[in-house]
Image (cartoon, helix red, strand yellow):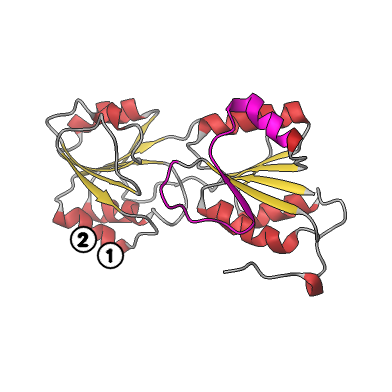
Amino acid sequence: MHVLVLGGTTEARRLAESLVELLPAGARLTSSLAGRVLGPRLPPGEVRIGGFGGADGLAAWLRTHQVDVLIDATHPFAGTISFNAAAAAAAAHVPLLALRRPGWVPGDGDDWHPAGSLAEAAAALPALGRRVFLTTGRTGLAAFADLDELWFLMRSVDAPEQPHPARMEVLLDRGPFTLDGERELIRRHRIDVVVTKDSGGAATAPKLTAAREAGIPVVVVRRPPAPPGVPVVDGPETAVEWLRAHLPHGPRPTAARTQPSG
């Protein structure tokens, strides 16, 4: 039994932590990380870093390494790898599950402005504010590079590359973030508009509450479409239940479970 998890998210790490206990003795668990973040938090089990070379490369890897189940637990905006996973799983005849955290839902008092892309988000900004808290990650900054009249506070795990806005301060930080911290950040930098992707999850959600409290608008980039026909679950626990149906000999008995190292 060999399970491949396409990871890089908090949910993928939590899933790997559960699977090292669930899988039968002698089974393999491999987590694959794209390698776009320096110093990633590694999950338990085997880890590979780097791309596969598209759908054909992933399909070849699935066959060569005798993968029995593929779980796509990548970021909701990692659209290319998700479609590659769907094509590769179909070609290699490997069951595929997508693990996607639920998206955010606006509440009373939220001033959200949906956008279909980063370019659409950039086009909306001049009418909404002048001091932008940009939390869409270090890729895709070219969409905002021509907005010279705006000032940006850009937060990401790693430093961005050109092209990016000329008037930009970079804040290197990694979630989870606190509500008090987000309130102070908005106050100190006099932020009057926030831009975010609809990543979902609790780790970065406090900025939305802080924006609502401050009465400032939030431009929310909608998620890309998911591959059709792929079953989707919303958390590691439901992914484990799905995987139980694909285990050839059932889960490892409780007495024989081993704890992950570290």
| Residue 208 spot, x, y in % from top left | 33, 51
Residue topped by disc 2:
184
Residue depicted at x 43% and y 52%: 39
> For this rendering, which residue is in front, 88 or 117?
88
Answer whether labels 2 and 1 touch (C-beta < 8 Å): yes
Residue lying at the far left of the rendered structure: 149
Residue lying at the far right of the rendered structure: 249
Task: Look at the image and give the residue range highlighted in magenta.
Answer: 36-62
Rendering quarter of residue 146? top left
| Residue 152 spot, x, y in % from top left | 19, 40
The numbered mark at residue 180 is 1
| Residue 240 spot, x, y in % from top left | 70, 55
Horizontally, residue 240 falls left or right of residue 25, namely left
What amino acid does circle 2 point to? Glu
Does residue 153 appear in the picture of this structure?
Answer: yes
| Residue 246 spot, x, y in % from top left | 81, 48
Circle 2 — which element? helix
Query: How crowded is the residue under tag 2: few (<14 C-alpha within 10 Å), some, or many (20+)?
Result: few
